[in-house]
Image: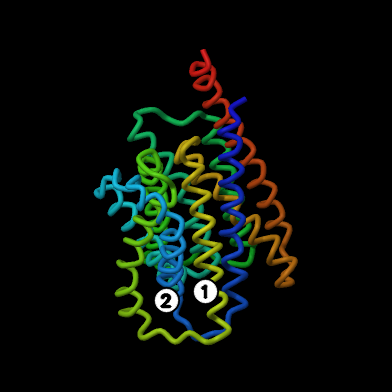
Amino acid sequence: MNTASIRSIAMVLLAAMLWGTTGTAQSLAPAGLSPYWVGALRLVIASAFFALLAWPAWRARRGGGLRWGPVLLAGACVATYNLSFFAGVKSAGVALGTALAIGSGPIWAGLLQTVAQRRLPAPVWWLGTLLGVAGGAAMALDGGSTVRAPWTGIALCLLAGLAYAMYALTNKRLVAQAGAAVVNLAVFGTAGLLSLPVALLLGGAPTVAPGALGIVLYLGLVATGVAYLLFSTALRHISGATGVTLALAEPVTAFALAVAVVGESPSAMAYGGLAAVLAGLLLVIWAELRTTRPAAGAAAA
């Protein structure tokens, strides 16, 4: 059994758990800070975190092998994801917007990887992905939302899913050229520089209340910095499409926190969606391990 793949799968699941704390963390913050500034500031804080980790590599001249074309593409994708997700959720609603953005990401990733490799992922991978996407949508909608929304909001959320998928596939190429901290510094630094003027334009001048500062620091350091470091490192040993699909574990964590911390009472539909997501993740993990096992065996021979 490929232990590197198993370890990488665990890292993505842990990253998704950290991403799943984002909604609860933001719900605990006092009102007043624009979501556009939340997105931009978390990128800037994460960049500072990556800079501290990447400094030894830069000092030893091990961080200069990156191709800046893919770096700019990945950074633009991260910035696009943040902007289109917040704008799409504002237009389409939190439930539907989240379902579209997170749910479309794995499908976009599978299609993009198919085009790049000229080979379809295994049928079991598609089955697990579609099952997980359907379950995530059920958890997000929770029987209480209609699917009526402006087409612009729907398009923005689908764009967010596409941007995330493109980021993951591009990032997989980058982490083969340099360490994960160096790659993330370049990508998130680019995304932060792109996001700041947009946040100023759409959110006005930032006003950070004392209670919000701790939340923003948590989002930047933990839910972004640590989470994306885990995700990028894991992409060395699993496919980009699988990494995006495993991120569907994010709504599982959000679901648990909503029940335990916020005190929400999910419907039977949400519990059914939870079961579907877990079943889908197991199928995707099985498909990934079946794919990497022959390669590991060939390498050992």
Dot 2: element: helix
Q: In the displayed structure, does residue 259 sit left or right of residue 166?
A: right
Q: In the displayed structure, does residue 202 sit left or right of residue 140?
A: left
Q: Nearer the viewer, residue 232 or 121?
A: 232
Label 2 is placed on what type of residue? Trp
Q: At 31% from the left edge and 67% from the top edge, which residue is drawn?
A: 193
Q: At 66% from the left edge and 52% from the top edge, which residue is drawn?
A: 273
Residue 48 numbered tag: none
Q: Nearer the viewer, residue 268 or 207?
A: 207
Height in image: 126 above or below 210?
Answer: above
Disc 1: which residue: 216
Disc 2: which residue: 37
| Rendering coords of residue 107 (x, y %) | 45, 44
| Rendering coords of residue 133 (x, y %) | 55, 48
| Rendering coords of residue 222 (x, y %) | 56, 62
**Quadrant for the N terminus in the image:** top right
Q: At 46% from the left edge and 51% from the top edge, which residue is drawn?
A: 104
Height in image: 129 above or below 190?
Answer: above
